[in-house]
Image: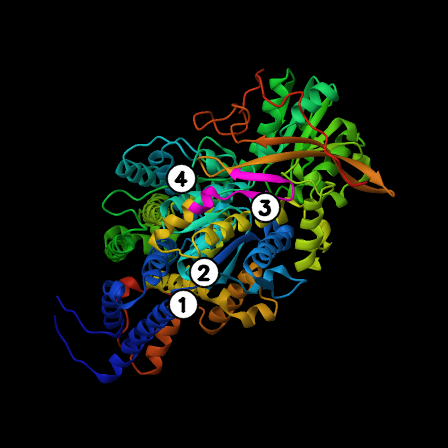
Amino acid sequence: MSSFKWRGRHLVLPLAAAVIVVAVGAAGALAASAKTTASTIKVAVLSDCQGAFGSFDGQDLAGVVSAMSQYAGAKPVDPNNPRKGWTGGQINGHPLKLVGVGCSNDRADTAIKETKRLMEQLGADVMIGPLSGDESIAVANYAKQHPTKTFVDGSAGAQDTTLKVRAPNFFRFNGDGAMWNAGLGDLAYNKLGWKTAAVVADDYSFAWTSAAGFIAEFCAVGGQVTKRVFPPLNTTDYSSYAQQMPTNVDGTFVAVGGAGLIPFLKAYEQAHGPIDGKKFIGNLFWGTPGQFEQLSTRVTGAYVGGAGTAGDLATPAAKNYANNIIGKWFKTIPPYGAAAPQAASTFTYGFFINTWGLIKGLQAVKGDISGGQKKLQAAVKKAVLPTAYGTIHLDKYNQGVIPVYYAQLYQKDGKLAVKTVGYIPNVDQTFGGTFSASTPAPGRTSPKCVKRTLPWIGKTQHPKVVG
Amino acid sequence: MSWRVTPDRVVGVGALGVAVLAPLLFSTYWVSTLLTETLFLGIVAASLVFLSAYGGMVSLAQVALYGITGFVLGNVVTNGNTKGLNLGWNPWLGVGLGIAIATTVALLLGALSSRSTGIYFLMITLTYGVIANLFFGQVTDFSGFGGISGIDAPAGIGPVTGHPNRLYYVALGVSVAVYALLRYIVRTPFGLALQGVRDDPVRMSSLGYNVMLHRTLAFGFAGFIASLGGVLFVWWNGHIDPASIDLGATIDVLIIAVIGGLTRVEGAWLGAFLYVLMLNYLPSITFLGSIGITQDRFHTLIGIVFLVIILVSPNGLIGLWERTLKLVGSSRFGRPAVEAPGGGTDV
């Protein structure tokens, strides 16, 4: 070693750089510690503001903010912009502070990045979300690794999220995609007379689960699924997939959702001519407010799987939820306009009931989230929600047991409208014993098409609806 | 052996000292998230900088290679509750297999593209990235859209949640080792020949050097480096899916390398640090939202910062540092010839 000569000017820059790094880090540390207030319950929301379901971001946040306002004394910051969050709100004197709203894009990788930001950088205690299937599987796994935090789902409906992952601190009051389609297989085979069917679904966990519900039930009663087609989520050109759809079947079940639904149907018509609505059953997206209005009247007559919602239900509870809760706290929900008609959307309702379940848990423990949130988690598990569409409670894996509705598209004043026509109470995640932790997860080839018995076959009820 | 005190070395030692003491100086979030992410992103970017600075090859396949390691590791170590093979094997076997497979793939891909240079090499490696993304997105046996979740670090390093400093120190150790290895490699006959291949492949070929073999080996070696980053990434993230290695992620690593400076390996970690800071703190600035740069348009902001840095200093932050040294009259502390690859490759 030689020439060990310290010169002042040579040290200035490196020392300055080191000081800046330390200062920035210390500032971050101070900022993080400053955010810690003992009595405040820090809440984060994970929504999708991009990707296939980005247009439902407003509905997600409207559900959360409405529940906070209705049950925890909060108030929306802006009745026309749910993303701005809420002010006020408390549980037994513990303020409910919204520390951040995550912006995901239906991809699990983004959901995890956003969850880390919300929980670790912004220091949230509890999180509501995410929106879509694979995001929720990743978040449930994240929850498992962070047992001292509590997570409730938003509207995600992948089966694995609760049936396989089984995080003790992740709770889902909404159903999964298969549960939401209870009744459709029976309807297709026994009422519509379909003996064979084709299935097209987005190539990801929620749509696989959604298709699994239809396939399991349709095959259970004796139907045959002759073709399954799975275009990737976020596909823009569906022409090659539409070409693969067979026309020598009695009907087609469509579980292509979000931004892909309209492009798929257009591609289908280009390949096979105008759609006959009576030969189609769609999953929840065909009836989701904000989405179904974009469909052509050519799909009139098509049946639509549910999401545990029935916006036209002629009960005081259903009307109250739309007009006196969602319609009370929000005037409009962008980008789809008036708020009340969007109350029955999967997304508004899903985020609403999950937030409500969280609030019930917090109220049960009087806002005390100490002790690694174990008391809170036990309380959320016991929460029972008397929702607008029926009572929901959780099973042993923190999955909601829910009422399911399905609907039919019809024309009202020349425009497409949705009418609820079927109701099946108390659907659980095993789907009448079809699914369990040891059965293969829904996928491109599962479930297999086999005949079996389901408890609700032939017992679908027909609820009284408005109009 | 002579060892002069230069500003570079003082800063290097200072930075290393701060890094070693980081858990005492910074919050847990800073250490477990920002600095750990900086380190593994820096490793991946360093593999790109190495190829660019010493081989004249700007590769867009480094993220794909680190992703291959991550997917192999995820498939091998998980057990039952996620997509993929769920083999449930020993985590260290997963690490070994992940690195070995990624390095082998890198050698094969390197051989395939070894005749290409410049923009054609860039495009071929971009194709590799797209193929990897689509492969893992479409082949549900290995991943599918949702990817693999619940990947835990092995006992002794994980659980990451309970012991965030352990993974940080592992990442720091690997970073230091990677840096030392890169510094060593470029001084070996192979490294010197590689720089000759970079500067004048025709002359090197005339002298009897196998240009394609050198390029292939360099690409394979860079793949090995990237795979180390891949291991650290999945341990840190606990999850990997095709979006982790999509075009956006590929471009992000290129941006990191360019922001840091494509001429020197150190720039990779510098670029990664700035990128991670921007990623984490810029979305929290309310003012940006009020002028339309909301979270979903965040990459617009990254792009603006990227443009500013490139306009101010074409050689990135490292170039800025070197120009600053010149301004204060320290240019005589130039770097040794072997580590001065010239202007790098423009992108």
Mark 3 or mark 2: whose residue is earlier in sequence: 2
Q: Which residues are magenta?
A: A379-393
Taking A255 as reference, is A16 left or right? Answer: left
In magenta stretch: residue A390: yes
Residue A35 is tagged as: 1
In the image, what residue occupies the spot 53% across and 68% down?
B304
> In this view of the protein, can residue B200 be seen by the observer?
no
Asked if residue B263 is positioned above or below residue A442 in the image, the reply reads below
Residues marked 3 and 4, same chain: no
Q: Which of the pair A396/B161 is nearer the observer?
A: A396
| Labels 3 and 4 touching (C-beta < 8 A) | no
Taking A254 as reference, is A2 left or right? Answer: left
Residues marked 4 and 2, same chain: no
| Labels 1 and 4 touching (C-beta < 8 A) | no
Q: Amino acid at mark 2?
A: Lys
Q: Quadrant of residue B111?
A: top left
Kindly identify which chain the residue marked by label 3 belongs to.
A
Residue that mark 2 sits on = A42
Residue B71 is tagged as: 4
Distance from Cα at disc 1 to Cα at disc 4: 37 Å
Residue that mark 3 sits on = A350
Distance from Cα at disc 1 to Cα at disc 2: 10 Å
